[in-house]
Amino acid sequence: MPDPDRTPATHDIGGLSRYRCVPVEHDEAPPDEFGKRVDALRQILAAKRMMTVDELRRGIEAIPPDEYFELTYYERWLRSITALMLEKGVVSAEELKR
Amino acid sequence: MTDTPVPRFAPGTRVTVRDDWPERRGPCHIRTPHYLRGRPGTVQRVLGAFANPEDLAFGRPAPKRVLYHVLFEQPPLFGEGRSGDDVLVEVFEHWLDPASERQAA
Protein backbone atom coordinates (compact mmCIF):
# COMPACT_ATOMS: atom_id res chain seq x y z
CA MET A 1 0.00 0.00 0.00
CA PRO A 2 1.72 3.20 -1.13
CA ASP A 3 -0.41 5.49 1.05
CA PRO A 4 1.45 5.86 4.36
CA ASP A 5 -1.82 6.67 6.10
CA ARG A 6 -3.05 3.17 5.26
CA THR A 7 0.07 1.28 6.28
CA PRO A 8 -0.83 -1.52 8.71
CA ALA A 9 0.71 -1.67 12.16
CA THR A 10 3.68 -4.04 12.47
CA HIS A 11 1.75 -6.94 13.98
CA ASP A 12 -1.25 -6.59 11.63
CA ILE A 13 0.15 -8.91 8.98
CA GLY A 14 -3.00 -10.62 7.70
CA GLY A 15 -3.27 -10.60 3.91
CA LEU A 16 0.06 -8.84 3.35
CA SER A 17 1.70 -9.93 0.12
CA ARG A 18 5.12 -10.45 1.70
CA TYR A 19 3.70 -13.26 3.87
CA ARG A 20 1.85 -15.02 1.08
CA CYS A 21 2.99 -18.49 0.07
CA VAL A 22 5.01 -18.80 3.28
CA PRO A 23 4.36 -22.09 5.07
CA VAL A 24 2.43 -21.75 8.30
CA GLU A 25 4.65 -22.36 11.31
CA HIS A 26 3.26 -25.19 13.40
CA ASP A 27 5.13 -24.25 16.51
CA GLU A 28 3.46 -26.48 19.05
CA ALA A 29 6.60 -27.00 21.13
CA PRO A 30 6.19 -26.15 24.81
CA PRO A 31 7.88 -22.96 26.02
CA ASP A 32 11.53 -23.23 26.97
CA GLU A 33 12.74 -22.27 30.45
CA PHE A 34 12.95 -18.61 29.50
CA GLY A 35 9.42 -18.65 28.10
CA LYS A 36 8.06 -20.35 31.20
CA ARG A 37 9.63 -17.72 33.45
CA VAL A 38 8.21 -14.89 31.35
CA ASP A 39 4.76 -16.49 31.41
CA ALA A 40 5.01 -17.00 35.18
CA LEU A 41 5.82 -13.31 35.54
CA ARG A 42 2.83 -12.36 33.41
CA GLN A 43 0.52 -14.63 35.42
CA ILE A 44 1.70 -13.22 38.75
CA LEU A 45 1.27 -9.63 37.54
CA ALA A 46 -2.21 -10.48 36.21
CA ALA A 47 -3.20 -12.17 39.48
CA LYS A 48 -2.07 -9.07 41.35
CA ARG A 49 -4.15 -6.98 38.89
CA MET A 50 -1.07 -5.06 37.82
CA MET A 51 -1.58 -5.73 34.12
CA THR A 52 -4.05 -7.29 31.70
CA VAL A 53 -3.47 -9.40 28.63
CA ASP A 54 -4.83 -6.52 26.53
CA GLU A 55 -2.11 -4.27 27.95
CA LEU A 56 0.44 -6.98 27.16
CA ARG A 57 -0.74 -6.96 23.56
CA ARG A 58 -0.64 -3.17 23.35
CA GLY A 59 2.95 -3.25 24.60
CA ILE A 60 3.91 -5.90 22.05
CA GLU A 61 2.29 -3.92 19.25
CA ALA A 62 4.26 -0.82 20.28
CA ILE A 63 7.64 -2.48 19.65
CA PRO A 64 9.32 -0.74 16.68
CA PRO A 65 9.22 -2.90 13.52
CA ASP A 66 12.97 -3.50 13.23
CA GLU A 67 13.12 -4.82 16.79
CA TYR A 68 9.77 -6.62 16.60
CA PHE A 69 10.99 -9.05 13.96
CA GLU A 70 14.31 -9.65 15.72
CA LEU A 71 12.77 -10.69 19.03
CA THR A 72 11.43 -14.14 19.82
CA TYR A 73 7.84 -14.65 20.97
CA TYR A 74 8.56 -14.51 24.69
CA GLU A 75 11.18 -11.81 24.28
CA ARG A 76 8.36 -9.64 22.93
CA TRP A 77 6.32 -10.47 26.00
CA LEU A 78 9.16 -9.53 28.32
CA ARG A 79 9.78 -6.33 26.41
CA SER A 80 6.10 -5.41 26.76
CA ILE A 81 5.91 -6.35 30.45
CA THR A 82 9.01 -4.25 31.15
CA ALA A 83 7.60 -1.24 29.31
CA LEU A 84 4.26 -1.57 31.13
CA MET A 85 5.89 -1.75 34.56
CA LEU A 86 7.98 1.32 33.73
CA GLU A 87 4.87 3.12 32.45
CA LYS A 88 2.95 2.30 35.64
CA GLY A 89 5.86 3.30 37.85
CA VAL A 90 6.10 -0.18 39.38
CA VAL A 91 9.81 -0.21 38.61
CA SER A 92 12.17 2.60 37.65
CA ALA A 93 14.73 2.62 34.89
CA GLU A 94 17.43 2.80 37.58
CA GLU A 95 16.11 -0.36 39.26
CA LEU A 96 16.12 -2.21 35.96
CA LYS A 97 19.78 -1.39 35.41
CA ARG A 98 20.83 -3.17 38.60
CA MET B 1 -20.82 -1.97 35.97
CA THR B 2 -22.49 -1.12 32.65
CA ASP B 3 -25.63 -2.45 31.06
CA THR B 4 -25.25 -4.88 28.22
CA PRO B 5 -25.85 -2.92 25.01
CA VAL B 6 -28.59 -3.91 22.57
CA PRO B 7 -27.17 -5.05 19.21
CA ARG B 8 -27.63 -2.45 16.48
CA PHE B 9 -27.35 -4.94 13.60
CA ALA B 10 -29.28 -8.16 13.06
CA PRO B 11 -27.84 -11.16 11.20
CA GLY B 12 -28.07 -10.59 7.45
CA THR B 13 -27.51 -6.82 7.71
CA ARG B 14 -25.09 -5.36 5.17
CA VAL B 15 -22.46 -3.26 6.91
CA THR B 16 -19.29 -1.35 6.07
CA VAL B 17 -16.20 -1.42 8.26
CA ARG B 18 -15.08 2.07 9.20
CA ASP B 19 -12.14 3.29 7.14
CA ASP B 20 -10.33 4.54 10.21
CA TRP B 21 -6.62 4.20 11.00
CA PRO B 22 -6.11 4.95 14.71
CA GLU B 23 -2.68 3.27 14.59
CA ARG B 24 -1.55 6.25 12.51
CA ARG B 25 -2.61 8.71 15.22
CA GLY B 26 -0.71 7.30 18.19
CA PRO B 27 -0.50 4.40 20.62
CA CYS B 28 -3.52 2.16 20.43
CA HIS B 29 -4.69 -1.43 20.51
CA ILE B 30 -7.34 -2.40 17.99
CA ARG B 31 -8.74 -5.72 16.87
CA THR B 32 -9.97 -4.73 13.41
CA PRO B 33 -7.54 -6.03 10.76
CA HIS B 34 -6.22 -3.45 8.31
CA TYR B 35 -7.52 -5.35 5.29
CA LEU B 36 -11.15 -4.82 6.36
CA ARG B 37 -11.09 -1.04 6.65
CA GLY B 38 -13.72 0.47 4.39
CA ARG B 39 -14.90 -2.95 3.21
CA PRO B 40 -18.50 -4.12 2.95
CA GLY B 41 -19.62 -7.32 4.63
CA THR B 42 -22.65 -9.08 6.05
CA VAL B 43 -23.41 -9.62 9.72
CA GLN B 44 -23.61 -13.34 10.26
CA ARG B 45 -24.07 -13.64 13.99
CA VAL B 46 -24.22 -11.58 17.17
CA LEU B 47 -21.56 -13.01 19.48
CA GLY B 48 -22.45 -11.05 22.61
CA ALA B 49 -21.07 -7.96 24.32
CA PHE B 50 -17.55 -7.73 25.71
CA ALA B 51 -15.43 -5.16 27.50
CA ASN B 52 -13.81 -3.05 24.80
CA PRO B 53 -10.18 -4.23 24.41
CA GLU B 54 -9.25 -0.79 23.05
CA ASP B 55 -9.86 0.53 26.58
CA LEU B 56 -8.63 -2.55 28.46
CA ALA B 57 -5.28 -2.18 26.71
CA PHE B 58 -4.74 1.09 28.57
CA GLY B 59 -6.24 -0.01 31.89
CA ARG B 60 -9.19 2.35 31.34
CA PRO B 61 -12.82 1.67 32.26
CA ALA B 62 -14.02 -0.50 29.39
CA PRO B 63 -17.74 -0.34 28.52
CA LYS B 64 -19.11 -3.45 26.86
CA ARG B 65 -19.41 -3.37 23.08
CA VAL B 66 -21.37 -5.75 20.88
CA LEU B 67 -19.18 -8.15 18.91
CA TYR B 68 -20.28 -9.70 15.61
CA HIS B 69 -19.18 -12.35 13.19
CA VAL B 70 -19.06 -10.48 9.88
CA LEU B 71 -18.67 -12.32 6.59
CA PHE B 72 -16.63 -10.80 3.74
CA GLU B 73 -16.00 -11.95 0.19
CA GLN B 74 -12.36 -12.97 0.03
CA PRO B 75 -11.25 -12.08 -3.55
CA PRO B 76 -11.71 -8.29 -3.13
CA LEU B 77 -9.80 -8.36 0.18
CA PHE B 78 -6.70 -10.25 -0.89
CA GLY B 79 -6.84 -10.04 -4.68
CA GLU B 80 -6.92 -13.80 -4.90
CA GLY B 81 -9.28 -16.66 -4.27
CA ARG B 82 -12.33 -17.94 -6.08
CA SER B 83 -15.86 -16.65 -6.14
CA GLY B 84 -17.60 -18.04 -3.09
CA ASP B 85 -14.47 -17.93 -0.92
CA ASP B 86 -15.13 -15.82 2.12
CA VAL B 87 -13.54 -14.56 5.31
CA LEU B 88 -15.29 -14.56 8.69
CA VAL B 89 -13.99 -12.00 11.19
CA GLU B 90 -14.98 -10.85 14.67
CA VAL B 91 -15.66 -7.11 14.49
CA PHE B 92 -16.89 -4.79 17.25
CA GLU B 93 -19.99 -2.72 16.61
CA HIS B 94 -18.27 0.66 16.86
CA TRP B 95 -16.24 -0.29 13.78
CA LEU B 96 -19.38 -0.90 11.70
CA ASP B 97 -21.74 1.39 9.81
CA PRO B 98 -24.84 0.39 7.88
CA ALA B 99 -23.85 -0.24 4.27
CA SER B 100 -24.90 2.50 1.89
CA GLU B 101 -27.50 1.58 -0.69
CA ARG B 102 -24.85 1.69 -3.38
CA GLN B 103 -22.74 -0.88 -1.55
CA ALA B 104 -25.74 -3.02 -0.68
CA ALA B 105 -26.84 -3.23 -4.30
Image: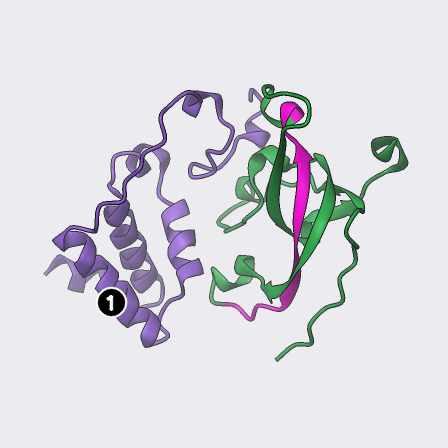
Chain colours: A purple, B green
Image position, residue A15 (x, y; %): 51, 29
Visible residue check, residue A66: yes
Residue at 29% x, 52% y is: A77
Q: Is residue B63 left or right of residue A35?
A: right
| Among the 4 quarters of the image, the one containing residue B15 | top right
| Among the 4 quarters of the image, the one containing residue B10 | bottom right
Residues shaded magenta: B60-76
Relative height, residue B35 to residue B83 (above, below): below
Image position, residue A4 (x, y; %): 55, 27
Quadrant of image for the N terminus of chain B:
bottom right
Image position, residue B68 (x, y; %): 66, 53
Relative height, residue A85 to residue A22 (above, below): below
Closer to the camera in the image, B42 or A66: B42
- View extreme (bottom): residue: B1
Quadrant of image for the C terminus of chain B:
top right
The number of numbered discs placed on residues in the rendered structure image is 1
The residue beneath circle 1 is A91
Amino acid identity at mark 1: Val
Residue at 47% x, 67% y is: B59
Kind of element beneath mark 1: loop
In reply to whether residue B63 is colored magenta, the answer given is: yes
Q: Is residue B76 left or right of residue A54?
A: right
| Among the 4 quarters of the image, the one containing residue B39 | top right
Residue at 10% x, 61% y is: A98
